[in-house]
Structures are given as structure tokens and as C-alpha cells.
Image (tube, rainbow, N blue to C red):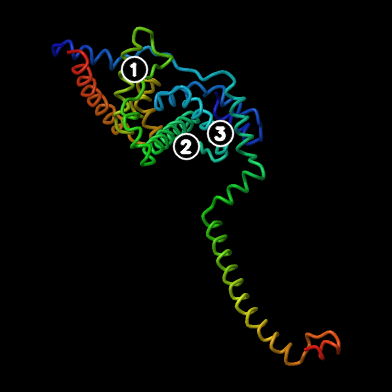
Amino acid sequence: MDDKKLDNRVNETLNSFDGAEKATPAPYLLTRVNARLQKEVLPGFWANAFTIFSKPVFAIAVLGLLILNMIVITEKQNTDNGASQNTTTTKYDFAINVSSMYDVENQ
Amino acid sequence: MNQPDLLERLNKGDTTVFAEIVESCQSMVYNTVLGIVQNEEDAEDVTQEVFIKVYESIEKFREESALSTWIYRIAVTKSLDFLKNKKRQKNGGLLKRIFEPTREDEPANFNHPGIVLDKKEDAAVLFRAINELPEKQKVAFILHKLEALNSQEVADIMKITLMAVESLLSRAKNKLKEILKDYYQQHFK
């Protein structure tokens, strides 16, 4: 393709929008917009809940709560072990694990 | 569409105003969006988003510019946002890039429904070339050539000076000429 032909071709292409008609959307655009508006403006309980749950702050807060919970449980277990040992010793010292006098004799 | 009348009715709480805006501006919005996103299905979607935005912020609309200019601005912004999201989704994911490396290299030809039949092929080539322009040049060119707006109207929509629009259009045309020359040299030796 020589230079003149090439220039003509390029100019023709550049002017290919001339006389173009405006494209129109599919019918009932207003109905579709209104339907979408109702969906978006009134998202409902679950959509709202999802928005809150999907926030990183919420995830961090839940994680913090879980860690705190685990710490409390572990601490409690340690305390319980110590306490139950003490109770057992005291129980035998004062013989409070017997229900009647016969049990004392049996021991 | 009589703008002062529309705004007065809107201030009085007339709910039919929005319907009138959609009816009178749908073609202008869709045509602009279609020129930028170059896909009819996507353009339908973005057009709906534009009118949702109009509905949500019409009360904030100040009469500093014409209502149509304001709606054009929303249409351009929404279209560009859509393209950015689409690009981000395409580029996102290392695995996707490894397994589908050539999908985005060859964009499909776009046929604008309003183009005259004997110019459809040339217009498809031009649309492809327009995609290679920088964002601002692309918007200015589409508004000027496809929406047939004058430079002042384009300047109002893009919130830039008339000189800046002229410069954008001139650079866009030069760049398009380069791209088209390369294209025809490669395809029609």
C-alpha cells in the first residue's frame, strides 16, 4: 500500500463515525433501573448483616474475643486443677467423703 | 427537558421527575457509555448504574452546570470506573495470568449499532485504536466524535479549559493516525 493510499485509508477510518446514529438501550430501562433501585436502596437484613460481618474490624474483634476466651479457659483450668487437689486433701483430712459412720470404720 | 422546571418540581417532591430524566437522557447516557466500554451488555449495566447515581445524588445537584452536563460527567466517570474494575479483575490472580495469558491480548471487535453499514468495518478498527489512547484523550474523542459535542461542551463535561480539550483532541487524532497506519501496514501489505 503506497503512502497516499495509506493516508486515505487512515482518514476514511478516522471519519467512520460521521453520520452515526445514537445507540439506544433495550426497552424498559426505567423499569430495570427502578427494580435495581429497590434492591439497592432496601438491601434487607441479611445484606446489612453481611456488610457488617465482612468488615475487617469485625474479624479482628472476633479473633480478639476468641483469644481472650482461650486465655480465660486455660487460666480457669489451671486454677481448677489446683483447687481440686486442695479439696481432695482436705476431704481426706476431715473425712468428709464418707456418708455414714460405717464408712469411717471401713476406711 | 426544561431544567429549572424539573428542579423546581424536584424540590417540591415530585417523584415523576426521575422518570422524565431517565426517558429524556437514556440515549445520550447509553451512547456515551457504549462508546467508552465498547460492549452492549456492559453498557446496559453501566447505564443503569449511572441513573442510580443520578437518583441518589440529584438533591446534591447544584445548578452550576446544565443537568445534561452533570449526567454526562457521571456517565463518563462510571464508564471509566467500570473499565478499571474490569482490567483489575483480568489482571488479578497469578494463576489466571499463567493459565490464560493470551485472552486479554486480543480484544473482540466491537460493532456500534448506530454506525452506517458501509462504515462498520472501519469503525470497528477505529474503536480498537481508541482503546489504545490515554484515558482523557479517549473520553474527549468519544464525546466529540461519537456524541457530536462541540469542544466547549466537552470542556464543561471534563471540567477542563477549551484549550486543553483542543490539545487532547489534536493529540488523540495524531496518535490514532499512527496506530491506524501501523495497523494497515501490517494487515494490507
Instruction: Tell me the mark number nearer the camera, choosing from 2 and 3.
Output: 3
Q: Using the rendered image, report if marks 2 and 3 lie on a common chain.
A: yes
Q: CA distance from mark 2 to mark 3?
A: 21 Å
Q: Secondary structure at mark 3?
A: helix
Residue B52 - label: 3
Instruction: Give the quarter of the figure containing the C terminus of chain B.
Output: top left
Discs 3, 1: same chain: yes
Residue A88 as seen in the image, left or right of residue B153 = right
Q: Residues within 10 Å of mark 1 (few under 14, many from 20)?
A: many
Marked residue nearer the N-terminal end (1 or 2): 2
Q: CA distance from mark 1 to mark 2?
A: 37 Å
Q: Say what secondary structure mark 1 lies in.
A: helix
Q: Chain of mark 2?
A: B
Mark 3, mark 1: which one is toward the viewer? 1
SS for dot 2:
loop
Q: Are marks 1 and 2 in contact (CB under 8 Å)?
A: no
Residue annotated with mark 1: B124
Pointer 3: residues within 10 angstroms few (<14), some, or many (20+)? Answer: some
Q: Residue furthest left?
A: A2
**Residue beneath the point at 24% across and 15% down:** A11
**Residues indicated by labels 1 and 2 sit on the same polypeptide chain:** yes
Q: Which residue is mark 2?
A: B64
Horizontal side of residue B68 vs B160, given as left or right: right
Question: Percent x, y for residue A101?
Answer: 86, 90
Instruction: Residue lying at the far front in this picture: please name it.
Output: A106
